[in-house]
Amino acid sequence: MSRTVLMLPGDGIGPEIVAEAEKVLHKINEQFSLGLSFESGLVGGAAIDATDSPLPDETLEKATKADAILLGAVGGPQWDSLPMARRPEKGLLGLRSNLELFANLRPAILYPQLASASSLKPEVVSGLDILIVRELTGGIYFGQPRGVRELESGERQGYNTYAYTESEIRRIGRVAFEAAQQRGRKLCSVDKANVLEVTVLWREIMNDLRREYPDVELSHMYVDNAAMQLVRAPKQFDVIVTGNMFGDILSDEAAMLTGSIGMLPSASLNSEKQGMYEPCHGSAPDIAGKGIANPLATILSAAMMLRYSLNEEKAAEAIEAAVSKVLDQGLRTADIMSEGATRVSTREMGEAVLTAL
Amino acid sequence: MSRTVLMLPGDGIGPEIVAEAEKVLHKINEQFSLGLSFESGLVGGAAIDATDSPLPDETLEKATKADAILLGAVGGPQWDSLPMARRPEKGLLGLRSNLELFANLRPAILYPQLASASSLKPEVVSGLDILIVRELTGGIYFGQPRGVRELESGERQGYNTYAYTESEIRRIGRVAFEAAQQRGRKLCSVDKANVLEVTVLWREIMNDLRREYPDVELSHMYVDNAAMQLVRAPKQFDVIVTGNMFGDILSDEAAMLTGSIGMLPSASLNSEKQGMYEPCHGSAPDIAGKGIANPLATILSAAMMLRYSLNEEKAAEAIEAAVSKVLDQGLRTADIMSEGATRVSTREMGEAVLTAL
Ligand SMILES: CC(C)[C@H](C(=O)O)[C@@H](O)C(=O)O
Ligand SMILES: CC(C)[C@H](C(=O)O)[C@@H](O)C(=O)O
């Protein structure tokens, strides 16, 4: 049985960083005789330029058939003035929604070798290891109705709908409780239940689930307080579960606590464990094409892919060990550079990981 | 012409901290012959316990007539299981909406005397001085329809509506541009225009306004990036303008960057400059009644009140100078305590400000 991995480089620094991750995957495929085959496709701005659609049918078809997807990043200023339906982001959102990748796992880990990169005091972040579980196919990202309408007064009103059903909440809740069981057994559910009805239901369902996972300690926090607590004392958290919009905000905030967002991978899974894997950082158009982007978040995303979608834990660990080794060697791309380290390019970093494998 | 200030202590530490601010206001009223008269009223949980309503008619009437309101805080665990319409928060939201207090000004300032309280590195936050302008009477906080409904499938769905009209956006935009003119002339508008239609309209109107304020440099940032940039390099911001929900999250995050949220005041204004003033921190039920809460955010809120609603700049400055003086004297409540300083109670801190006046 051969398994297929679809590479979707996307925009900005996407192609550069995915190229390095692809080399790593090829090598690990041989070393561990994984029997993976590789395909590639267009998504985002690159797809708009070539086909006029951010998610061409061909890409969606390949994605549906693939066992796992490795995505670079989408978006850039040249597509910012397009109407909403034809923006690069729609390619990403379309993949998430068509494949029902409802469970987005975003670890925020401080690498000891990079501790000084954080803007927080060392004692506040040393040893930081949080997992944010973000719902990814519902909430205000996909809620209907939405749009801009003209009111009777003649002025326009923009509107979106923030909605969740019980079953949508329950399935992401289960993923979060199970992740907590594998980790520190503490789960914090983030909502705004003092203001938003949709999150009153969210909190109710999370409380229901508690009975199925008596070994996990569940707490609740309002989103404004969570944004504060992440800055004040982030190590109080183990696993955080929240909706699509709050998860977008809090996972980026949490990632930045580490100071090295160029190191952070993410996974988006459906109920068959089919998954899309991507770095937490974006397409960084300002440094695209310069060969200075950090490929490690994408390489670590490939490791997550091996672990979660392809069930190849040993291969995943081999990649993670190789990344740790190049950090120990003092190799750094520009974003994580510090005094005394050796500055390397995107390609040199990729080669160093290959050598370390 | 006599002017009236309504004191609404509310819940938790509210009564303790408002009591100190009230003493300060009484003294400044005499010193500067301001001719202020004072009233008080019930709101939040305290009002629920006494009248069964979080915003009794009597309070709303007094509030409507008052020139300015000083509020402590609302909410606490004993009211958390009440239905949404009868929660303490509805008292606060009802005041905001009935008085049309659409412009919420939340400064995040690092007091040099308290620099060590921040969880961020000194070089990242020293001299920090950001103003967040949050829209306060629209957006998803007040959008209709909202609630929990049963779907045909039999399961429940929670839903809320995030909506803004052009005029709602324009009036908060003007407040923000004008605030930027008084400060560093840089305005960053935060939205999620790559996903949410309502914020596409938001961005369009902000761009329109730019023409009226050519001396202000306007930029746009997605909310996830803003949450990140506040952690990475907060001093890049001067004024931030955003909607109700994003403003709730980002203003708390920004406040916590200073490490001393017990110091931060806020103002909520309508188009007649009638205003409600309150500390940025909440009701802190865990320390209520212990006499250890920090009254300075409330005292500084009273100063903001003198400045914005009562047009008494000198009196405002006198209070701010007195607060700075007690900090210089090394007096600290528990929340801002550090080695070598003198720990004082809520009342002692209030008395010290009175003496410094
Ligand atoms: C590009 C954008 C649509 C996307 C999102 O908001 O989900 C990104 O910010 C992310 O977090 O993956
Ligand atoms: C108490 C709550 C309703 C309120 C809000 O969300 O606006 C508070 O968090 C605030 O920021 O003033």
Image (cartoon, coloured by chain):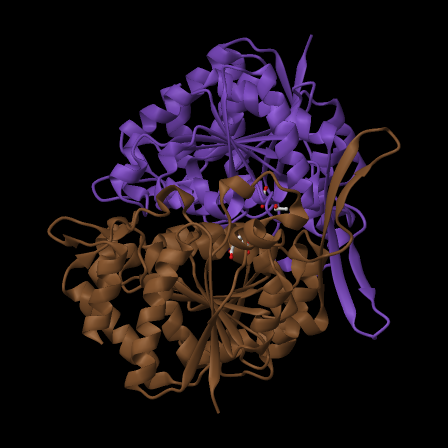
Chain colours: A brown, B purple
Q: Between residues A51 and B224, which one lies in front from this camera angle? A: A51
The reply, left or right, for residue B31 in relation to residue A245 is left
Percent x, y of residue A88: 57, 51
The reply, left or right, for residue B139 in relation to residue A135 is right
Percent x, y of residue B294: 43, 40
Q: Quadrant of residue A102?
A: bottom right
The reply, left or right, for residue B166 in relation to residue B334 is right
Q: Between residues B214 and A220, which one lies in front from this camera angle? A: B214
Q: Quadrant of residue A18?
A: bottom left
Q: Is residue B318 above or below residue B55?
A: above
Q: Do we see residue B69 in this rendering?
A: no
Q: Do we see residue B142 in this rendering?
A: yes
Percent x, y of residue A104: 52, 67
Residue ranking furthest to the left? A340
What is the quadrant of the C terminus of chain B in the image?
top left
Residue found 61% across the figure and 71% down from its top: A61
What is the quadrant of the N terminus of chain B in the image?
top right
The reply, left or right, for residue A19 in relation to residue A195 is left
Residue found 46% across the figure and 81% down from its top: A181
Residue found 15% across the figure and 60% down from its top: A330
Q: Is residue B66 above or below residue B15?
A: above
Q: How many marks?
A: 0
Percent x, y of residue B177: 56, 21
Q: Between residues A276 and B163, which one lies in front from this camera angle? A: A276
